Image (cartoon, rainbow, N blue to C red):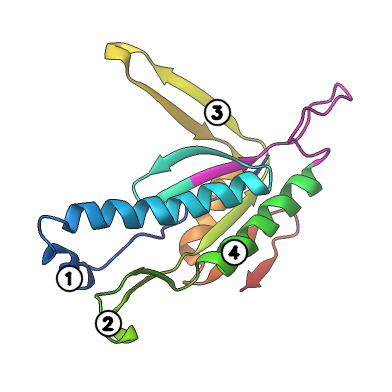
Amino acid sequence: PAYLAPQRPLCIPSRRASGLRGQRPKGAELMCQIIDRFFGTVIDCIHRYCGDVVKFAGDSVCAVFEVGDNSGKIPRGRAPHLRAATARAAACACALHKELHNFVAWKEEGAPDERAIHLSLHIGVGCGPLTLLHLGGHHGRWDYVLAGDGLLQANQAEPMAKSGETLYEALETLIFTL
């Protein structure tokens, strides 16, 4: 499947987040609301492009855009071939940037715009085989573990993308700046 790499949207430097600490006891509630709004938009966008969120890791989201199998029948939501899945991942990345670049996470009432906390994201997209393992069971704890070329490509591309950029490490190794 095409793989939308971990995004790192919620790295709020502590000096910027300090304004939330001053909102006690509501600081933690405000942070939860920010995370809910931001990740809610991320999840909705991924679903709009027929992707599946498979893992949250800190401030990252991992999503896959699956390809149908070789049986000739394409399950609902899956792309008919790898190019289509990669195109969906790329379109989703563009939409995420459009919807969430410079996202206003928090702004103190009456404060100037430059004092607001803004979030942005950078994305890596990989393409290729992916293995999804569902491991665990001990004490009722389960975890998804991802492995494969698509994951490797995406994880190599993501840290090289700057804020507001998507780096595509797929098929033709294309680089797009948004």
Q: Which residue is mark 4?
A: 167
- Cα gap from disc 2 to disc 1, whole angstroms: 9 Å
The CA span between labels 4 and 1 is 32 Å
> Residue 98: horizontal and vertical position, in percent?
59, 69
Could you say which disc has been placed on residue 19 in the image?
A: 1
Q: Is residue 66 magenta?
A: yes
- Amino acid on which the number 4 mark rests in the picture: Leu
Amino acid type, residue under disc 2 in the picture: Arg
Quadrant of the drawing holding the N terminus = top right
The amino acid sitting under disc 3 is Leu
Of labels 2 and 1, earlier in sequence is: 1
Q: Earlier in the sequence, mark 4 or mark 3?
A: 3
* Of the two numbered discs 2 and 3 in the rendering, the one whose residue sits closer to the viewer: 2
125 drawn magenta? no
According to the picture, the residue beneath numbered tag 2 turns out to be 115
Against 15, is 84 above or below?
A: above
Instruction: Compute the Cα span from label 2 to label 3.
Output: 42 Å
Label 1 crowd bin: few (<14), some (14–19), many (20+), radius 10 Å: some
| Front: mark 4 or 1 | 1
Query: Residue 111 vs residue 45: left or right?
Result: left
